[in-house]
Image: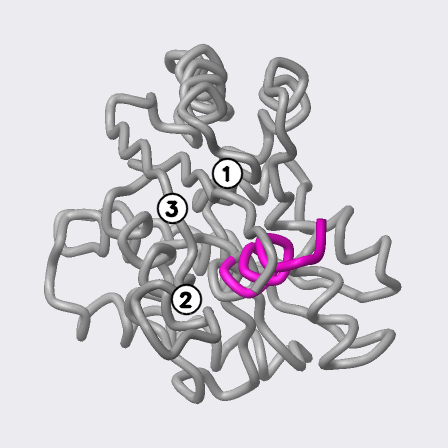
Amino acid sequence: MGRRAVIGILGGMGPAATVDLFDRIVRATPAETDQDHLRILIDNNPAVPDRTAAILEGGPDPSPLLQAGVQELARRGAELLAIPCNTAHHYLPEVQAVCPVPILDMIVETAKHICTTHGDGCTVGILATTGTVGTGLYQRALEAENLAWMLPSDAEQEALMDAIYGPQGIKAGAAADGPRAAIQGIGRQMAARGAEAFVLGCTEIPLVIGPGDLVKPSVASNQVLADVTVRRALAPR
């Protein structure tokens, strides 16, 4: 087996999503022994300010810690970086500008995957934080792949944010049943309005929503990121 790239994960946004990406990379790696797996460096820094609050409310800027994190991972030997937070990709251009190694773009890769698996013109329901929605990251990426998109209504988006951030939400470590039921309800309503597939555009959502849990097919952005990370790390160099 040829030389494999060392992977760096800039995590902590949130910690459970970081663990989930690590697990997905391990599962996606074609390995029969421990030695067949990839070397992975993880910087799990939950001190990074909330990205949605920064974008929508003028909260503390997360970019200095994001920049410092990728630089530290590169210094430690990472050759390919992944960030398991969709909203953090709003800062990707300025973070990549100070990083000497490539950072994978989870949002662009997810849009490409949806186009490949669901075809041109598919109407994709975007399930993401209000920060991600407000930046237009997924809207632009989907349009670049000739895909139509649909957003939740204001009430649905509020319910989605509560499922993620609320006291009984995913980030609070609450039982999965409540957030899962809420997101499934949002999916049913959006499907009734024409959504043909869903992008799980917040890395917390796939912690409670798996394949087949929504009324239409769904694509987990963190699974796409894991698959692309493994392919790039194993590519001949």
What range is drawn magenta here?
Answer: 226-237
Residue 99 on image: x %, y %: 59, 20
SS under mark 1: helix
Q: State the quadrant of the N terminus.
A: bottom right
Residues under labels 2 and 1: Cα distance?
Answer: 32 Å
Give the answer, above or below, for where 197 lies relative to 88: below
Against 127, residue 91 (above or below) is above
Mark 3 or mark 1: whose residue is earlier in sequence: 3
Q: The residue under label 2 is which amino acid type?
A: Asp
Q: Which mark is residue 206?
A: none
Q: Position of residue 69 (x, y in %)?
A: 41, 21
Q: Whole-Å distance between the Cαs marked 3 and 1?
A: 22 Å
Which one is closest to the eye, mark 2 or mark 3?
2
Local packing at callout 3 (Cα closer than 10 Å; few below 14, some 14-19, many 20+) is: some
Find residue 63 and report its horizontal and vertical position in percent: 49, 16
* Disc 2 to disc 3: CB gap under 8 Å: no
Q: Does the magenta stretch include residue 93?
A: no
The mark that comes first in sequence, 2 or 1, is 2
> Which residue is located at x 70 percent, y 71 percent?
114
* Tags 3 and 1 touching, CB below 8 Å: no
* Cα separation between marks 2 and 3: 13 Å
Dot 3 corresponds to which residue?
40
- Circle 1 residue: 87
